[in-house]
Image (spheres, rainbow, N blue to C red):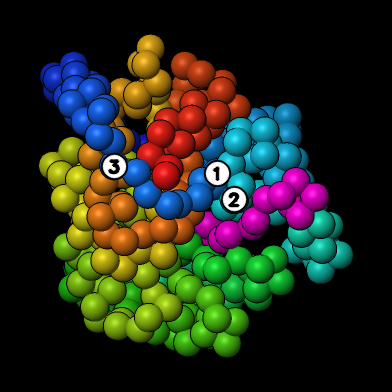
Amino acid sequence: MKRRTFIQQSGSALLAVSAVAGFAEGSNNVVKGKFDISVAAWSWHKMLFAGEVKQIDQPRMVREAGATGLELVNSFFPSPQYSYLQTLIKTAQNEGVKILLIMCDDEGNMSSADFRERRQAVINHKKWLDIAAVLGCHSIRCNSGHQDDPAEAMKYAADSFNELSAYARQYGMNVIIENHGGYSSDPKWLCALMDMVGVDNFGTLPDFGNFPKEIDRYAAVKDMMKYAKAVSAKCHDFDADGNETGIDYARMMKIVLDAGYHGFVGVEYEGSRLSEPEGVAACVKLLKRFQS
């Protein structure tokens, strides 16, 4: 699960200044809208890998951060058994937290030219739809897969995601792809895949980060919002006024809200200066500026 965004040293100062200036310029008339705030479980990945917290602790941590939704990660499940899922549901309900989706990694190559490999990847993802249905989720997040040729990758991915989306339909659920490296971080490729599959329960999860330096992240998110079923608010660090230092949140949230999106916006903290709980809380606080 590679979740990294980089600011080139030569342009970092200018980007940080423009991000702050963008918010300050509209500070008296900041765009506001109706949306809820969730937290992606990856925000606490260091604590989870260190054994400091468990998945069952995450609903409480969401509440403590001031959010109301939780986005799970498949690799953090200690058990997929029904009894554990029921315990997780009850724990979330007691904290007033809704479990929204499962981010699925390491389940095979959905773009493989080998039919058997591609078919196995689809089968591997189906179990997470079954689990997500028990938990009351609206989606699972998948990776687009990899293949040397982008056109071939799109063709084979479309085949896989058509089948997976059809399976998800029985649960009234979505299959979504985040810009998460490879071809998925190319908004033109990803939006073309959306159109190729062309079903209403297949969509995107625009992440404010996860784009290569040559991609205009604001234009990319705007293009992806047409298909968005969820939104990921990437955070790395904050200035003294609470603004994210690498992303103009006022500009980004205007794009999200102008698209008519009123679902959950999910915090995904990946910084190192603040602790994970502190970083999550800071990003939640920043997002609340834009809630009406």
Task: Classify 122 as above or below 89.
Answer: below
Whichever of callouts 3 and 2 sits on the residue coming sooner in the sequence is: 3
Q: Amino acid at mark 2?
A: Gly
Q: Residue at x 35, y 63 (%)?
A: 228
Residue drawn where x is 60% and y is 73% of the image: 129
**SS class of the residue under badge 3?**
loop
Q: Quadrant of residue 235?
A: top left
Quick check: 44 above or below 102?
above
Q: Position of residue 211 (x, y in %)?
A: 26, 45
**What residue did someone put label 2 on?**
69
Closest to the camera, between mark 1 and mark 3, is 3
Find the distance from the CA under tag 1 to the CA under tag 3: 22 Å
Which mark is first along the chain, 3 or 1? 3
What residue did someone put label 1 on?
Answer: 39
Badge 1 marks a residue whose secondary structure is strand
Q: Amino acid at mark 1?
A: Val
Q: CA distance from mark 1 to mark 2?
A: 6 Å
Q: Identify residue for label 3.
A: 31
Write the start and end of the magenta stretch as one range.
92-105
Residue 116 visible in the shown view: no
Mark 3 or 2: the one toward you: 3
